[in-house]
Amino acid sequence: MDFRQQPVPLRLSAGLWEAKVKTMSEWRLTANAQRVAEVGVVMLVLGLAATLRLHRLDLADLRFDEAIALRLARGIAEGHWLAIAPFSGSVANHPPAYLYVMALPYLFMRAWWLAFVWRVMLDVAAVGVTWWMTRRHFGRGAALIAALLFAVAPWAVQMARKTWLAVLPLGSALALWGLLEVVSRREAWGWALVGWGLVLTLGAHWSGVFALPLVGVVLLWRWRTVRALPALIGWTPLVLFGAAYLVTDLQGGASNMRALVNAGSGVVQHSLDALQRALWLSGGAHLSDLTGPAFETWRAQPIWSWRWLDTLQQLWLGAGVLSALWLAWRAPHLRMAVLVVLAWEGVPIVLQVRHTQPVQMHYLLLTYPAPFVLMALVWQLVRRDLATRAVLLAVTMPLTAYHVVLTLHFSHFLEHHVTYPGGYGPPVRAALALSQAVRDEVQAGRAREVLVVVPGADPNVDEAATVLDVLLADLPRRFVNARDALIVREDAPLVYVFAPEAVSARDLAAQHYAEWQARAFPIAEQGGPAFHLARAAGLRMPGDLRPLPAQWAKGFGMLGYRAELRADTLHFEAYLRVFGVPREDVHWFAHLYAGEARIAQHDIAGVHPSQWREGDILLLRFVLPHAPPNAALHFGAYTFPEVARIPLINESGGAIGESVVVSLSAALDSR
């Protein structure tokens, strides 16, 4: 062999190597371009999800369930920790994990809009998790389709705009992702995802319990994947929430635990309501159910003729289920993953075929994001057939466009039609405009505080008070029960807010001021019930007020009263001045006596002492049946719930009785 020829193949090898390096470099550039393009598309999908969910915040449905959750979350941020979420659940009070998540924005400011945006972004994050999870286990194409379908599904959009206690789709997405990691890749850190997912599902709403059978089966099957650190990180929060709930409930007589145990003891029904609602949740079918009394008007809309696309979307979901079954049979490397996704969708449905409570839409939120992943699996099944892929894309694009248009049109419909009762609640638009007007008054120095006059006046249980307490959280405010009380003051100006149901209280307040400027904020575009803001100054006491000086031991005294017969009923109004604020709750009574016999009575809560300030004049209103001419009215107060009479006192502080006595014949004759 002539060794002088050796350099030739070396030069050829170098050339081949250079060609190979060049090819690999081009491939890397192509791969990088694909990744950049994919990230760009994902950002567009997430942007679309956020836009649809944040569109027209002023049309959000903010009623008691939505507002009380925000109020409790704000309380947590202010240091009032909860082990059980009060005022929640049709069977038992729910765990409070959702409230702790919603408390995070309140650590920065008390603005309602920030909490609402935070809630929406949690669902946008769920769309992102769905893409990431699906990409890891089923490929790039399936991931983009699943995320896109989730982003635009009209029911998913509407559920993201509800701030009530419910399963968070971010939690169900994390739990499903964790199970996929465990069964497909035997990844121990999947259990951390499962734990955090259960915190945001089971720890937020009892419907999350439907995830436990599948989690239990996977745990028994893949118990060898459990590692101490991932389990500790993932499951500690759930254990802490559960232990706190259990201990607190046991201290209160275990009422919630008993309610859960007895939940299945009612009248048992068997139906496919859960399957029906799960199908609706996967798209926009029956979004018209939220139109309530405006349903016939909705049916006349042009978009009603396109509802067949909802049927097509549900058929697509059915095809996704069949595709999952086919992949489980023909693709061993995907078998466990698709079976878990199928189970995540199916188990909550099967477990609610038998039920004692009506199946609600939000009971099926746990299934998210499984329906969108199942629909995307059709893409996985036809990944090598370009023609079928083209058909699938041809279906995806118009369906996506229809869902976007449906969501936007629904918002437009809410703006111009009344959909309550029985449908979507009154948009928060009027209350938001009112709250901003009040904020302007306070910030301009025209009022030091706001007197909110609403029925009931307890933000814990009364809807109007709860909603306004959330919207006015950053302002000094006091609540007055419009049914039987009012606060007036001499140091003006004052700013009053009146709920739509407080018309009589508004008219009564207007009679007590020389200056009265009121603005209406109609709830509906067509007018009708409205919130009112009033600026008042120049207190003037009624000319027919009969003086009756009296002093009680708890820091208040009587100025006088008014009495009037209207349609065979006696209307009695007592005026009291506040000198000090008692620690106890104070209730009031007006009892009618004929001789020694009590013939009628009316007891009221009036204004809670926590809402009193020195210098207040409390106007308390009582309505009693018509009484004989010789009747006498006994008026007084007692602490509640002890029902201990508060004594009248003289100038030296000695007790002189329990009530003032008004002769009705003298009081009515004076008129």
Image (tube, rainbow, N blue to C red):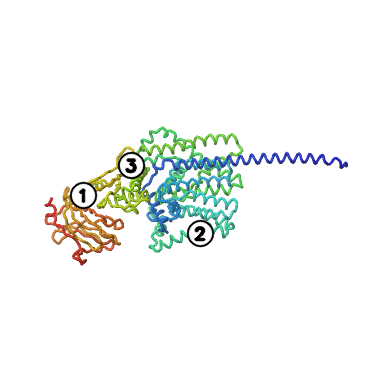
Q: Earlier in the sequence, mark 1 or mark 2?
A: 2
> In the rendered structure, are the residues bearing label 1 and label 3 in contact, judged by CB atoms less than 8 Å apart?
no
Is residue 607 shown above or below 46? below
Cα–Cα span, label 1 and label 3: 32 Å
Q: Quadrant of residue 134?
A: top right
Q: Nearer the viewer, mark 1 or mark 2?
A: 1
Residue 581, horizontal then vertical, whole percent = 28, 60
3 relative to 593 in the view: left or right: right
Give the left or right position of residue 278, taking residue 455 as reference: right
Mark pair 3, 2: CA separation: 46 Å
Residue positioned 38% across, 56% down in the render: 86
Give the residue number, with chain letter if any, for mark 3: 523
Whole-percent x, y for residue 591 in the image: 19, 58
SS at mark 1 in the image: loop
Would you say 284 lies left or right of 326 here? left
Q: Quadrant of the N terminus?
A: top right
* Front one among 591 and 110: 110
Badge 3: few (under 14), some or many (20 or more) residues near its Cα, within 10 Å?
some
Few, some or many residues within 10 Å of mark 1 (<14, 14–19, 20+): some
Secondary structure of residue under mark 2: helix
The amino acid type, in three-letter code, at marker 2 is Thr
- Residue 204 visible in the displayed image: no
Residue flagged by tag 3: what amino acid is it?
Answer: Ile
Q: Quadrant of residue 377?
A: top right
Q: Which mark is residue 540?
A: 1
Labels 3 and 2: the sequence-earlier one: 2
Drawn side of residue 194 relative to residue 520, left or right: right
